[in-house]
C-alpha cells in the first residue's frame, strides 16, 4: 500500500461511519413519525412502507457494525426491533371451524381510468367467486361490464348505485337488502373513493325467512379517500370510523364481511382501530400480508407497494383460504377468501 492509499483508508472509514450515523438518524426520525401516526399525517404515510423501514433499520445496524460505530449500531438494532414487531407479532384469527354454508368472496380495485378490462372480466367470471366487491367503478367502467352482469345474477339496484357507483358489488347469492352507510364525509378532490355499500345476502335457492329474521350474511364494500393530502387523510379516517361503528351495531352473532380498498395499510393505527371498533379480524391472518397496491411502472421488475386491500370477517366466520390474486391489469391485486359461515 502506498502512502497516499494508507492515508486515504482512514478517511474512507470515517466517511462510511458518518454515513452510517446519518442513516440511523434518518431511520430514527421516520420511526418516531410512525409511532405518532395516529396524530401525525406524515407518520401515517410512513406506515405504508413499514417493511422498507424495517429493512433500512437492519441495513443501518449492519453498516454501523462494519464501521465500528457500536453505539449507533445498538440504536439501529433497537429501531429494527421496534419496526419489526408489528410485522412478526401474532394476530387474532377468526373461528377455527364453522358449520354453515361456504362461499368465496373477493375484492378488486379495477383502476377505472383504463380501457381494457378483459383480464379483469376473465378472472372475475372464472374464479368461482360468489360475492365480488369493486372500487373505482364509474359509469364508463360499467359499460364494459356486461359480461359480469351475465355471470352474477344479483347486483344492487341501479337507483341506489347512480350513474357513477364508485363502489360496486356483484353476487351469486341473493341480495335481500342493499343500501349505503349514511353520514359519510365527501371531499370533492381527486382520491374520493365512494359511498360504502351494505348488503344483506342469502344463499341461492334459500327461501326468504321474513323481515324479522336475522340475515344469513352482511357484506360491506368500502373505498375511503386516498390520503393524498391532510384533508383527505382526515376524511379517510372519519369514513373508516363511521363504517366500523355501523358494523359494531349489527345484531350480535350476525356474520359480517367487510372488504375493499381501504387505502390504509395493515400497520396503520387507523386500520387497527377499525378492527378494534368493528370487532372484525383480518382474513389474511398475518401481520405482514403481501402487497396489494403497487406501482405499475416497476411491475415487470418487482411489486413495490403496500397491503391496502383487505377482507375482514366477524369472529364466528371460518377463513378456509386467503390469497392475493393475479395481475388483472389494475394497480391493485385482487384479494380472495374462501369462507364458511356459522
Image: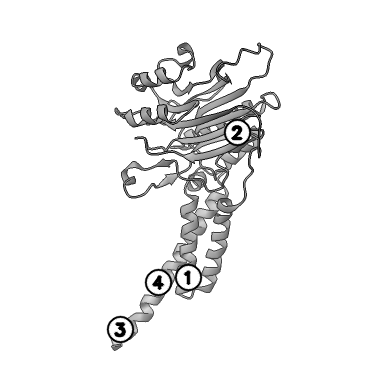
Asked whether the residues under the numbered discs 2 and 3 touch, taking CB atoms below 8 Å apart as contact, a structural biologist would say: no
Left or right: where does residue 128 sit relative to residue 211?
left
Which numbered marker is on residue 16? 4
User: In the rendered structure, which disc, 4 or 1, sits on the residue that comes first in sequence?
Assistant: 4
Q: Which of marks 2 and 3 is in front?
A: 2
Q: How crowded is mark 1: few (under 14 residues within 10 Å), some or many (20 or more)?
A: many
**SS state under label 4:** helix
Gap in Å between the C-alphas at discs 4 and 2? 49 Å
Tag 3 residue: 5
User: In the rendered structure, which disc, 4 or 3, sits on the residue that comes first in sequence?
Assistant: 3
Which numbered marker is on residue 313? 2
Gap in Å between the C-alphas at discs 2 and 3? 64 Å
Return the residue nearer the eye: 164 or 282.
282
Q: Which of marks 2 and 1 is in front?
A: 2
Rendered-image quadrant of the C terminus: top right
Return the residue nearer the eye: 97 or 7.
97
User: In the rendered structure, which disc, 3 or 1, sits on the residue that comes first in sequence?
Assistant: 3
Gap in Å between the C-alphas at discs 2 and 1? 44 Å
Gap in Å between the C-alphas at discs 4 and 3? 16 Å
Q: Residues within 10 Å of mark 2 (few under 14, many from 20)?
A: many
Tag 1 residue: 64
Gap in Å between the C-alphas at discs 4 and 1? 9 Å
In the rendering, at what x and y percent does residue 299 appear?
34, 45
Left or right: where does residue 143 sit relative to residue 97?
left
Amino acid at each position: 500500500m502506498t502512502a497516499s492509499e494508507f492515508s486515504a483508508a482512514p478517511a474512507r472509514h470515517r466517511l462510511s461511519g458518518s454515513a452510517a450515523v446519518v442513516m440511523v438518524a434518518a431511520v430514527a426520525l421516520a420511526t418516531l413519525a410512525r409511532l405518532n401516526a395516529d396524530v401525525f399525517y406524515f407518520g401515517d404515510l410512513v406506515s405504508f412502507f413499514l417493511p422498507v423501514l424495517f429493512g433500512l433499520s437492519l441495513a443501518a445496524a449492519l453498516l454501523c457494525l462494519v464501521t465500528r460505530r457500536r453505539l449507533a449500531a445498538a440504536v439501529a438494532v433497537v429501531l429494527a426491533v421496534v419496526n419489526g414487531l408489528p410485522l412478526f407479532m401474532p394476530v387474532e384469527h377468526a373461528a377455527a371451524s364453522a358449520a354453515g354454508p361456504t362461499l368465496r368472496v373477493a375484492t378488486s380495485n379495477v383502476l377505472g381510468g383504463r380501457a381494457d378490462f378483459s383480464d379483469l372480466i376473465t378472472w372475475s367470471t372464472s374464479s368461482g367467486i360468489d360475492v365480488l366487491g369493486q372500487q373505482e367503478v364509474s359509469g364508463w367502467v360499467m359499460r364494459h361490464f356486461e359480461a359480469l352482469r351475465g355471470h352474477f345474477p344479483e347486483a344492487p339496484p341501479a337507483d341506489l348505485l347512480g350513474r357513477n357507483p364508485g363502489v360496486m358489488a356483484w353476487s351469486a347469492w341473493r341480495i335481500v337488502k342493499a343500501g349505503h352507510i349514511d353520514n359519510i364525509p365527501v371531499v370533492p378532490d381527486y382520491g374520493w373513493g365512494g359511498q360504502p355499500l351494505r348488503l344483506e345476502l342469502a344463499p341461492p335457492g334459500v327461501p326468504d325467512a321474513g323481515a324479522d329474521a336475522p340475515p344469513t350474511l352482511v357484506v360491506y364494500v368500502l373505498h375511503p379517500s386516498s390520503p393524498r393530502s391532510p384533508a383527505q387523510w382526515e376524511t379517510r379516517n372519519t369514513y373508516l370510523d363511521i363504517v366500523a361503528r355501523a358494523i359494531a351495531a349489527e345484531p350480535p352473532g350476525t356474520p359480517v364481511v367487510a372488504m375493499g380498498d381501504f387505502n390504509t395499510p395493515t400497520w396503520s393505527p387507523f386500520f387497527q382501530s377499525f378492527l378494534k371498533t368493528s370487532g372484525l379480524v383480518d382474513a389474511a391472518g398475518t401481520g405482514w400480508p403481501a402487497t396489494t397496491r403497487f406501482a405499475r411502472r416497476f411491475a415487470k421488475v418487482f411489486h413495490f407497494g403496500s397491503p391496502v386491500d383487505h377482507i375482514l370477517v366477524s369472529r364466528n366466520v371460518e377463513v378456509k383460504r386467503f390469497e392475493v390474486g393475479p395481475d388483472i391489469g389494475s394497480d391493485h391485486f385482487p384479494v380472495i377468501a374462501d369462507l364458511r359461515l356459522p
